[in-house]
Image (tube, rainbow, N blue to C red):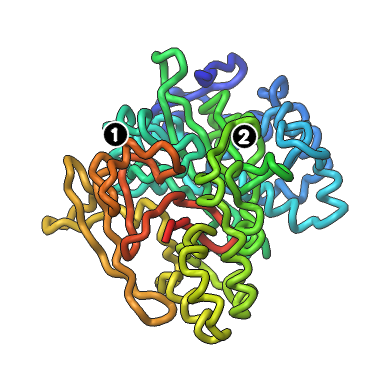
């Protein structure tokens, strides 16, 4: 769907560097956040009504500048985390959340506010309030990505933007990521092949039962400027990333599907199930430790990977299993989570960051919490995988997208960038 970009009652700017610059050049006063939201009342009346009952919650946001607000549409607000928004199950309203946990409501809204002003032109070009150098290549790589990456936004192609939000550890217990919990932004060509690219955000897992999936929220109306930044209207609320063990327990073949009716092969089903890792964490007495470790990057073996070494693991005691699990966690400095944009970033001799193109490949070593070293190898997605098969011909299993293939000590990353409360999960097949 092509984002609508007109609103006659307020002044809009889609390409200017800042909202204040718009005011200076046009001579018009940039509207306040309240004025802009009210001007969009046809699409945001539910949100506006809720704001009237929660003035204290929005006062801080209203006084913040240099932000981008992802405003859920009326349809998106009709049902949260399932139910009315198409996720299956009973809808949860904002009043339900308020009564259950006011801090959860605060976390929910802070997660819908991006740090930095991100117009759609920034989101599709990979530049703006916090875009990385790896993501800056998004525009020139988009065509290749459209033909190759997974529909759930987990493909490793150097195109994803990992944008920090106002959901930070010092504000709420519902995030433990330095600088603010991330939301993943990706752009793709419009369905009619013309016009501007479609921008979609990926967040936590929502739904229930077999309909659980990574939440997708697409911009339907874009670039409504206010004095503190800009607003995009999205068609689905973002879902807060859950605790690590809860995410692993709920993750499965449908977590990467756009519809619960999608057919999933038996091999893909076991490849994307992570319940064995939940059990391993519990046996090693590490569930709470890993749930609360700030800025975690963990490579989680699939059930198939555990089954392949089942006889060995079953004989391990708690300490031995703890060492195995700690070996799968990168030892990063505070404030650094290794999302896929960092994994595929190669520091070239000229000091520029980039990734493998034209068949180039590279390796990097990472220290783990256990004290050992993981070797991460990045190759172009069109090259052969570790087992000698061609990545583009492997349609039986969910892959990390043929834009790039990432191997960790020979195990392939088959699902990247699953957001959790305290960092990120990359699923490996070995």
Given residues 274 and 19, the one toward you in this image is 274
Q: Residue at x 50, y 46 (%)?
A: 267
- The image quadrant that residue 157 belongs to is top left
Return the x and y of residue 352 as percentages of the image width and height.
19, 53
Q: Residue at x 78, y 35 (%)?
A: 83
**Label 2: element kind:** loop
Q: From what the image shows, is residue 60 above or below residue 68?
A: below
Q: Residue at x 34, y 49 (%)?
A: 132
Return the x and y of residue 200 as percentages of the image width and height.
51, 34
Return the x and y of residue 283 as percentages of the image width and height.
62, 77
Given residues 31 and 101, the one toward you in this image is 101
Q: Which mark is residue 121?
A: none
Q: Which mark is residue 32?
A: 2
Q: Residues within 10 Å of mark 1 (few under 14, many from 20)?
A: some
Taking the image as drawn, is residue 20 in sight? no
Q: Residue at x 51, y 65 (%)?
A: 306
Q: Residues within 10 Å of mark 2 (few under 14, many from 20)?
A: some
Given residues 223 and 112, the one toward you in this image is 112
- The residue under label 1 is 141
- The image quadrant that residue 112 belongs to is top right
Badge 1 or badge 2: first in the primary sequence? 2
**Label 1: element kind:** helix
């Amino acid at each position: 769907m092509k984002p609508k970009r007109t609103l006659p009652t307020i002044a809009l700017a889609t390409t200017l560097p800042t909202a204040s610059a718009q005011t200076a050049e046009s001579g018009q006063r940039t509207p306040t956040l309240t004025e802009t939201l009210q001007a969009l009342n046809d699409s945001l009346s539910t949100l506006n009504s809720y704001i009237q009952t929660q003035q204290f919650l929005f006062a801080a946001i209203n006084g913040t500048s240099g932000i981008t607000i992802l405003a859920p549409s009326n349809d998106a607000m009709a049902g949260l985390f399932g139910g009315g928004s198409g996720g299956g199950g009973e809808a949860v309203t904002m009043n339900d959340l308020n009564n259950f946990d006011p801090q959860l409501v605060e976390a929910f809204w802070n997660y819908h506010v991006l740090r930095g002003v991100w117009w759609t032109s920034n989101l599709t070009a990979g530049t703006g309030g916090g875009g990385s150098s790896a993501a800056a290549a998004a525009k020139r790589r988009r065509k290749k990505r459209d033909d190759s990456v997974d529909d759930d936004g987990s493909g490793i192609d150097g195109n994803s933007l990992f944008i920090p939000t106002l959901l930070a550890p010092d504000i709420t217990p519902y995030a433990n990521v330095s600088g603010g919990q991330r939301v993943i932004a990706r752009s793709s060509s419009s369905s009619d092949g013309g016009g501007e690219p479609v921008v979609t955000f990926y967040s936590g897992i929502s739904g229930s039962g077999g309909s659980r999936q990574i939440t997708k929220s697409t911009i339907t109306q874009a670039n409504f400027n206010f004095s503190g930044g800009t607003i995009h209207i999205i068609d689905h609320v973002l879902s807060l990333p859950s605790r690590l063990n809860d995410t692993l327990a709920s993750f499965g073949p449908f977590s990467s599907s756009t519809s619960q009716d999608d057919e999933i092969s038996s091999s893909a089903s076991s490849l994307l199930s992570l319940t064995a890792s939940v059990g391993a964490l519990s046996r090693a007495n590490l569930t709470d430790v890993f749930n609360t470790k700030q800025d975690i990057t963990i490579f989680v073996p699939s059930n198939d990977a555990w089954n392949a070494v089942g006889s060995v693991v079953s004989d391990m005691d708690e300490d031995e299993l703890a060492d195995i699990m700690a070996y799968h966690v990168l030892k990063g400095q505070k404030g650094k989570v290794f999302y896929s944009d960092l994994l595929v970033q190669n520091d070239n001799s000229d000091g520029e960051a980039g990734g493998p193109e034209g068949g180039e490949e590279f390796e990097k070593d990472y220290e783990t919490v256990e004290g050992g070293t993981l070797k991460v190898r990045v190759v172009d997605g069109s090259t052969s995988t570790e087992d000698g098969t061609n990545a583009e011909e492997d349609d039986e299993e969910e892959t990390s997208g043929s834009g790039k293939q990432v191997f960790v000590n020979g195990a392939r990353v088959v699902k990247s960038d699953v957001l959790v409360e305290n960092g990120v999960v990359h699923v490996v097949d070995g």
